[in-house]
Amino acid sequence: MNIHEYQAKQLLSKFGIGIPAGHAALSVDEAVAGAKQLPGPLYVVKAQIHAGGRGKGKFVELPTDAKGGVRLAKSIEEVEAHAAEMLGNTLVTIQTGDAGKQVNRLYITDGVDIASEYYLSMVVDRATGRIAMIVSTEGGMDIEDVAHNTPEKITTITIDPAAGFMPHHGRAVAFALKLSGDLNKQAQKLARQLFDAFVALDCEMLEINPLVETIDGKLLVLDTKMSFDSNALYRHPDVEAMRDETEEDPMEVEASKYDLAYIKLDGNIGCMVNGAGLAMATMDIIKLNGAFPANFLDVGGGANKEKVTAAFKIILSDPAVEGILVNIFGGIMRCDTIAEGIVAAAREVDLSVPLVVRLEGTNVQLGKDILANSGLPIVPADDLGDAARKIVAEVKQAA
C-alpha cells in the first residue's frame, strides 16, 4: 500500500525525524489557511498523487508551458493561484503514464534554504533477505538515472534485520554522503531513526529524495515516499486508515474487498487463476499465442463460490476484456466450487465475450459436468496449451 507525501512525513515525525512544517489541503481555502499558519515568506505547493516526477510533470488542462506539480510561491496570493490551477486537474508524470492522475490533495510546506541535496532510501533486498539502505550524494535526481550514468555515486549498505542497526551502519551512511562534523552526527542519527521507522511500520520501501542540508546546518526530509507490506497492515490500523482509494484502480479496490490478488494490465484477455505461479504461466502462454493478458487475478487456494463470482464480475467490468480464460488446478480449491462460481457469475451478468475454462484436480469431472450442463456458451479445454490456443482463436473469431 502507498500513501501520500504528507502522510509519510506525519509518520516520520513520530520517530523524531526533521521535516519542514506543512499542511495538507483538499480545497483552495484550506491551502490558503495552511499557508497562513506557516512563517513564510516562501511557500511550496505540492500536488499529492501516488507517482514520482511531479515537479517535471504537466497538467493536461493547462498550457504546455505551465508549471508542474511542485511550485514555489512567494506570497499567500500565489499559493491561492497555484492551488486553484492544480486542484481537480490531471497531472501527467513519467510514472503516471499518458492517462495521468487527478490532483485531489495538496501539501503546502514552508520554504527551505537549501545548501546541498542528498538521496537516501531503504528497501527489502529479497536476494539477501536483508534491508538495503541506498545512499547517494546526487539528491534531487532520478536515482535510476544516477545508477545508469554514475553508478559509482551510489552506496548500498545492507543491514541484517536479526542483528539490527549498528553504529557502523550510521558511520557508513555519513561517509557515503561525505559529511563531517555535526552533519556527520546528524546523518548517523537520521539513518538509525529511518531504520527504526522502516522496521516498526513494516515498510516495503522508504525513499527520501531529496534529503537536504539547510544553510544553517540542519538535515531535513524535503520529500519522501513510503509503501507498506499489505500483509502486515492488520498490525497498523493507523497506517491502513491512510489509504486513498481514489489513487488506485477501481477494480483493484473492489478486488481487495474480497481478498483477491488483482492487477489490471493492458491486454484484452481476462485471466482467472488460482496460485500466483500458475497465473504467471497463464499470462505467459497467452502472450506466446499472440495475445495479451488484461489482468493478473489469483483467487487463492481457499476461494468459495462468492469469491469466485466476485472475481468473475471484476474481470467482466473491464471494457478492454474481449475474452476470458479460467485456468484452475484444484488442490485445496475444488473444481466444482470454481464451476459453480463461474456459472453463477455468468448468469448474473451479460456474458458477451468468449469464455474458455480449463479445470484439473479435485472434483474435476464434477466441475466439468456443472459447466457442460449450465446451458452457457463455455468452451472447455483439456490443458493449458489447449486453453490458450482456444481463447485466442475465439477472440479473433469474435472480432
Image: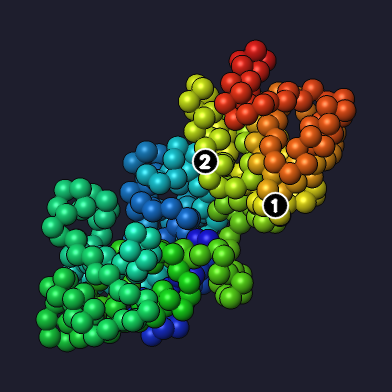
Q: Nearer the viewer, residue 282 or 241?
A: 282
Name the foreground residue: 168 vs 102. Answer: 168
On residue 332, the disc is: 1
Mark 2 or mark 1: whose residue is earlier in sequence: 2
Residue found 23% across the figure and 65% down from its top: 156
Image side of residue 24 versus residue 128, left or right: right
Judging depth in this view, the residue of 112 and 319 nearest the camera is 319
Relative to 287, is 310 on the left or the right? Answer: right
Residue 299 location, x and y as percent?
66, 48
Looking at the rendering, in which quadrant would you find the C terminus? Answer: top right
Between marks 2 and 1 in the image, the one whose residue lies nearer the viewer: 1
Inter-mark Cα distance, 2 to 1: 19 Å
Q: Position of residue 356 (x, y in %)?
A: 69, 27
Q: Would you name the residue on which mark 2 appears?
A: 280
Q: Residue at x 55, y 69 (%)?
A: 232
What's the amino acid at mark 2?
Answer: Met
Is residue 126 visible to us here? yes
Amino acid type at image mark 1: Ile
Q: What x and y, as percent, mark residue 320?
A: 61, 30
State whether residue 309 appears in this view: no
Residue in the picture at 16% in, 54% down: 151
Residue name at image x 39 percent, y 53 percent: 52
Counting other residues with Cα less than 10 Å from the Cα at mark 2, is it few (<14), some (14-19), or many (20 or more)?
some
